[in-house]
Amino acid sequence: EAGVVQSPRYKIIEKKQPVAFWCNPISGHNTLYWYRQNLGQGPELLIRYENEEAVDDSQLPKDRFSAERLKGVDSTLKIQPAELGDSAVYLCASSSVTGVTIYFGEGSWLTVV
Amino acid sequence: EDKVVQSPLSLVVHEGDTVTLNCSYEVTNFRSLLWYKQEKKAPTFLFMLTSSGIEKKSGRLSSILDKKELFSILNITATQTGDSAVYLCAVGSNDMRFGAGTRLTVKP
C-alpha cells in the first residue's frame, strides 16, 4: 500500500516568492493534515481536512498561507509571499478516522533565502 | 492551553543501555497518545495508547500510559545505534498536539 506522497521533497526560494506543496494521502483516508516542523521542535498543525472541508485551520497564517483539498483527495499548501521564517519542513499526514493513527509523508523541506 | 512536554530533551547512551523517555500532557480532549520515531525524514508510527495500564510492546520497545497522572513512558531495552532518532509524543483527539521530542543518540 502506498504511503502519503509529497512533492517537492526540497525547495529553495528567495523571500517574497511563492511556493506550493502537494500531497496525496493514503487511499481511503478521509482526514488530511498539514503540519509545519521547525528545527528542534515537534510538528505543529496548520490545517486539518475532513474530506474536502477544512475543519481546523486556526493555526494557519491566513495572510500568506492557503490550502485546498479539491475532491477530498489530493491537497496543496501554498505560501505567498514566503518569508525567511517560513523555512521549515512541511509535513502532510493522513488518517482513516480522526484521532487515531496519523501517517506522515516524507515532508517538503523549504529553505527561504 | 493544551501542552505536551517530553523529557529529557536529549539523551546520549551506549549500545546495550536501557532508556526511558517521558511524555506528560495537559489536553482538553483526550482520545489517544501516539509515539513516533523520527530520523532524518518523516515521523514513523510506533505505538498508539488509549487505555491506562496496558503496555504496548514491539520488540525492544514498549510503552505504557497513565491517564490518571497524565503521562506516558517509552522504554527501549538493549539499545542499538539504529535507535538513534528523535522520539515524538502526540496527544489529543481531533487535534493531536506534539511535544518537542527527545533526541536519543546511541553510541557504539
Image (tube, grey):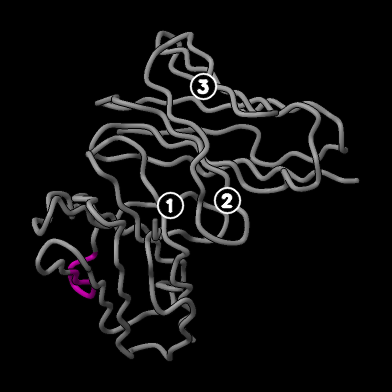
Task: Report how far apart the C-alphas of labels 2 and 1 lie in the structure.
Answer: 11 Å
Which element is circle 3 on? strand
Q: Residue furthest front?
A: A1
Indicate the amino acid at tag 3.
Answer: Ser
Q: Which residue is mark 3?
A: B72
Specify whether residue A49 is painted magenta: no
Task: Report how far apart the C-alphas of labels 3 and 2 lie in the structure.
Answer: 18 Å
Q: Residues in magenta?
A: A61-67
Callout 1–callout 3 Cβ contact below 8 Å: no
Q: Which residue is mark 1?
A: A43
Specify whether residue A64 is painted magenta: yes
Q: Chain of mark 3?
A: B
Could you tell me which residue is drawn at 32 percent across and 76 percent down? A21
Indicate the amino acid at tag 1.
Answer: Pro
Q: Which residue is mark 2?
A: B38
Q: Residues within 10 Å of mark 1 (few under 14, many from 20)?
A: many
Rendered position, A99 above or below B70 = below
